Image: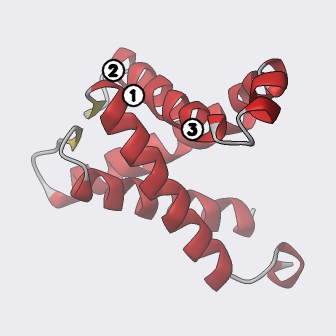
Amino acid sequence: MKNLIIRLLANAVALAIAAWLVGGITLEGATRGKQILTLLIVAAIFGIVNAIVKPVVKLVSLPLLILTLGLLTFVINAAMLALTSWITGKLDVQFHVDGFWSALFGALIISVVGMIINAVLPDKAELR
């Protein structure tokens, strides 16, 4: 449970940095507290999408992943971010990604921030 909360917060931080750096990713909210709540909701949805949809997409696109030497992973990550934006739009959560390039740059930033956070955070075994 502790690991889940830490990963949720890490995703929220990565999404916040992407929204801050990429012009096409917007996070709306009247107050800072509402923005933080929105980030936590988006991070949870993003985590669910990455846990359920992403493995299926990677399996289906495995021949193309091999052919592109893994570079298709960036496009898949962008698609997962765009899917998260679409889902949050349906749920009336104020998080939007405008277009492919914003999703691609946002996914790249989220991946880099996620790698840095994973390097800093303790291993799963240490959290128990």
Q: Which residue is mark 3?
A: 77
Q: Is residue 47 left or right of residue 70?
A: left
Q: CA distance from mark 2 to mark 3?
A: 18 Å
Residue 84, relative to residue 105: is it above or below?
Answer: above
Q: CA distance from mark 1 to mark 3?
A: 12 Å
Residue 101 is labelled as: none
Q: CA distance from mark 2 to mark 1?
A: 6 Å
Residue 85 is labelled as: 1
Residue 91 occupies which quadrant of the picture? top left
Between marks 2 and 1 in the image, the one whose residue lies nearer the viewer: 1
Residue 26, relative to residue 15: is it above or below?
Answer: above
Three-letter amino acid code of the residue under disc 1: Ser
Q: Residues within 10 Å of mark 2 (few under 14, many from 20)?
A: some
State yes or no: discs 2 and 1 in contact (Cβ < 8 Å). yes
- Secondary-structure class at tag 2: helix
- Secondary-structure class at tag 3: helix
Residue 10 seen from this side: no
Residue 89 is labelled as: 2
Between marks 2 and 3 in the image, the one whose residue lies nearer the viewer: 3
Q: Is residue 119 left or right of residue 82?
A: right
Residue 60, x across and y down, in percent = 81, 18
